[in-house]
Amino acid sequence: MAKSPKISASHEPGGLIVHISGLLPSLSPAEQRVARLVVADPADAARRTITDLATAAETSEATVIRFCRSVGMDGYPQLRIRLAAEAARRIEPPDARVVGGDIPPGADLAQIIATIAFNDARAVEETAEQLDPAVCERVVDAIAGAGRIDVYGAGASGFVASDFQQKLHRIGRTAFYFPDVHTALTSAALLGRGDVALGISHTGTTSDVIEVLEQARARGAATVALTNFPRSPITEVADYVLTTAARETTYRSGAMASRLAQLTVVDCLFVGVAARNRARAKKALEATAEAVQSHRVGGGRRRA
Amino acid sequence: MAKSPKISASHEPGGLIVHISGLLPSLSPAEQRVARLVVADPADAARRTITDLATAAETSEATVIRFCRSVGMDGYPQLRIRLAAEAARRIEPPDARVVGGDIPPGADLAQIIATIAFNDARAVEETAEQLDPAVCERVVDAIAGAGRIDVYGAGASGFVASDFQQKLHRIGRTAFYFPDVHTALTSAALLGRGDVALGISHTGTTSDVIEVLEQARARGAATVALTNFPRSPITEVADYVLTTAARETTYRSGAMASRLAQLTVVDCLFVGVAARNRARAKKALEATAEAVQSHRVGGGRRRA
DNA sequence: CGCCTCATGAAAGTAAGTTTCATCCGTGGC
DNA sequence: GCCACGGATGAAACTTACTTTCATGAGGCG
């Protein structure tokens, strides 16, 4: 299979910290220790010398340098400066207790709400910051010109996939979503050049989705991956990689923020596609809105 | 003037750059050359090495160090970091063009992304702000103690409903979602005291959802409405009303931000319920996570 | 079991930052 | 005119930080 050059976001304009946490699972254990220190307190890390940081991470200077390279820096001094800049830009979070992403056992509901909202909003913002408009553009082009679009996703990502399918459908693009792997595989087998397959997986390791995307690619379709981890397996079967920037890992915040981030990306694609043919998209949307009108009761803000 | 080892205890409150330009006249000629370079482009200076900067200022490294001391720094690395931080802070924050909520016809993708993310994040934050923890508490209580939970929603809200159902199911609560009105009505008819019915409708006017909620209420179940409009029809059949705060109205931003706001609310409820029985919820989540483990590739980290 | 790949830190090597010190230059006193 | 004197300055010695190289060992695969 001819592997076309993969397009992914190699830039990390918005947040270095976010970028690093996205790469975290693809790092070696020792590098992860360094990464965690850096992410936990960027300003502090910027103050440390390389030897100091190495000691704190219980590893050698060499590993710290490797870590720098892994996240795309030239060397330690560059990382230091970027971290300092990042830390300065970072606005003080509203409330320390809210930041951890984790919710303390004794938390009351007000606290829970604040924490979740903070993390959700952050995920959305940071995702947008690190999204590469150029890659999006290519994906939008592909979707806008596609004969058919298949959207794949399992579990929580399945909802997002399904949502995107519905959106595309509403503006008159031929799009499908399959809750079932077998059906999805069958569909992928029928894709061809000019079609698009979009696979969504937060971890990037969902084998079902990867498998289907692989199939689609083998058939000549353009493949797009949407994941939180830019070096996860799913990116290897994708022509275009779009990443979210949800930092949460704990079970409670679980897939929550990542879902919102995924939806944000999907919305951007959707609006991009709709903008390609504004008039037609608008007409289609109005038609579909009208279709459900009879299922609305008066008294709302819509016409009777 | 001149140089005594330490003049003032070097507190340069507002800006390092400002501080430096204030000291400029008291510096020696060679130091002034350095200072001017630094003030002219702090970010650039931060990137340079000491030798580099010395050369650019047509002086020696020693003088650069002297300059560092003169402005109250320990040495060159510290200056560099402070400069990087300073430069980062200087960057103009938001961007007026993004705030409007509407996307202009000629917008490029970068603009689209910024706009959507801004509105999405805002919707999440504002929703959290106006959510009434007391009402949430009651709803959480009801759900936590319910024999059965039905979640209703149509169209885009259907995804949210479905998502919530899945979440509740994962922590061992008996929850249902029905994509079809008839089935939903049937289910509602079987609810009773101690059960909970949650209806989601952005506009609050979706007759299908209202009808089902009404049915559930008639059977004695506690009814909860999640809508953006606190006086919409759906609120009339609900014991508890939770509202989102998505301001968007145009077709483009359409149901997008509202969906995220709904998800945020749903996540809050979910975490609230999970927190009611932390141990059991955790166990259930771990068990379900384990169940899908075999559908993930590369259990640990991925490619280098 | 042998081969390979990869992660890792010790140590060697290089570059950056810091200190020391001799020189230079202007100033003011004799 | 000559000579201290003191500050400014850069060359070079020196120290520390950063980077590379390489040997080792663990884990995976045939």
Image (cartoon, coloured by chain):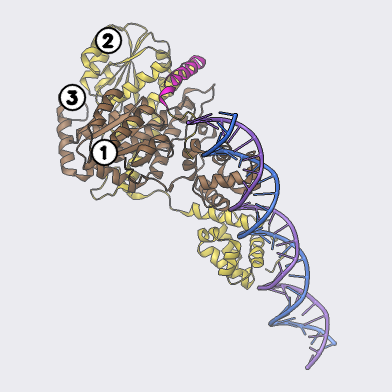
Chain colours: A brown, B yellow, C blue, D purple
The quarter of the rendered structure image containing the N terminus of chain B is bottom right
Q: Which one is earlier in the sequence, the residue at label 3 or at label 1?
A: 1
Residue located 40% across and 40% down the image: A127
Give the spatial CA distance, label 3 vs label 1.
Answer: 45 Å
- Image quadrant of residue A43? top right
Q: Chain of mark 3?
A: A
Dot 2 alpha-carbon crowd within 10 angstroms: few under 14, some 14 to 19, many 20 or more: some
Q: Which residues are magenta?
A: B277-296
Q: Secondary structure at mark 1?
A: loop
**3 and 1 marks on the same chain:** yes
**Residue on which the image places disc 1:** A221
A205 is higher (above) or lower (below) than B46: above
Q: Is A145 contained in the magenta span?
A: no
Give the spatial CA distance, label 1 vs label 2.
Answer: 42 Å
Q: Chain of mark 2?
A: B
**Is residue D18 found left or right of A294 in the rendered image?**
right
Q: Secondary structure at mark 2?
A: helix
Predominant SS of the magenta segment = helix
- Image quadrant of residue B121? top left
The number of numbered discs placed on residues in the rendered structure image is 3
